[in-house]
Image (cartoon, helix red, strand yellow):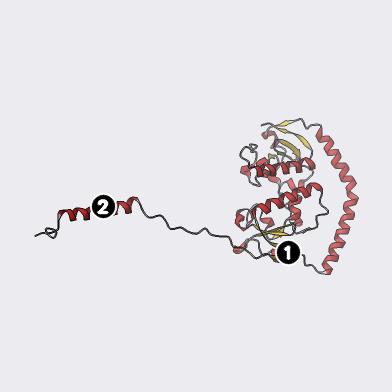
Amino acid sequence: MGLFDDVPEEVIWAILVGVIVYLVKVIWFPPPPPIIAKKKMPTYEKRDYTLEELTKYNGTNGTPIFVSIKGKIYDVSYKSSMYGPGGDYSLFAGHDATTCLAKSSFETKDLNRPITDTSSFSSDEMESLNGWVSFFDDRYDVVGHITAVKSTKSNENETSTSTTTNTTNNNTTSSTSSSTTSSTSTSSTSSDKVFTLEELSKYNGVNGNQIYVSVNGKVFDVSSKPEFYGPGKSYNLFAGHDATTCLGKNNLTKESLDKLDTTDFTPEQKANLEKWLKVYESKYPLVGSLSI
């Protein structure tokens, strides 16, 4: 006598159908994965920082990354690939980058000076700096402000150094201006020259060659700034290349060199490129255009 002999056939079929439906549901319609809350970046109470305190926020050993511009401190931690150790802008981490951004400088001597006093900046440098402030305001949280804490002796030393520097600068202004005017005049005669990318690559500052950089199809002679564009310097990446995409997208990588197509630029990236183009037009002689 079987175990299910007394069980009605309809019940057996109902059980089998139920088992089949359950298996189909489990196999073909698994439950959705659990919802994991998006990790939030830590927030910091706004307060004043000294320059010494700011240096601790440099991204090493898991610390957050702060950058100051014109005395405002931004938390750039979520862009650790750019500002963290080994990133293109790691120089700024834990420092005030006011002068660096105004003067397009990646020199350590330009870090932390001046903090809020920008009276010595030219109109072009102020325009560049204000553009960067807007850029940071749009992307990063402000976590505080810089408070300058210096001893009287330190201030006296800085005043003395500043006076000496200003005197030296005044003595050299005339000769520098004359040299720049001469250079501009000489270069302007060849501003109708058209370069190919291959021809442009020869002007890279190596073996005493001049240094040319192209921005949005315009070729500029930046040889007067070997401390920026010369071999081993911050912007040497651009020497002998078109830097359109690098400047528009704030991407200092070799992969972005010699890419003149701006059709995929956002309005913000186009504005950024236009800002840089004005900087180059105001600072360097135009020597030609790039063949596209």
Question: For residue 220, what is the image quadrant?
Answer: top right
Q: Closest to the observer: 274 or 239?
A: 274
Of the 4 image quadrants, the one containing the C terminus is top right
* Kind of residue at disc 1: Leu
Camera-side mark, 1 or 2: 2
* Kind of residue at disc 2: Ile
Asked whether the residues under the numbered discs 1 and 2 touch, taking CB atoms below 8 Å apart as contact, a structural biologist would say no
Residue at x-position 88% and y-position 53%:
168
Q: Residue 211: where, in percent of width, then height?
A: 74, 40
Residue designated by label 2: 20
Q: Residues within 10 Å of mark 2 (few under 14, many from 20)?
A: few
Mark carried by residue 51? 1
Mark carried by residue 162? none
Q: Is residue 185 above or below residue 40?
A: above
Residue at x-position 15% and y-position 54%:
9
Q: Closest to the observer: 239 or 141?
A: 141
Q: Residue 157: where, in percent of width, then height?
A: 85, 65
Q: Is residue 10 left or right of residue 44?
A: left
Q: Is residue 2 above or below residue 241?
A: below
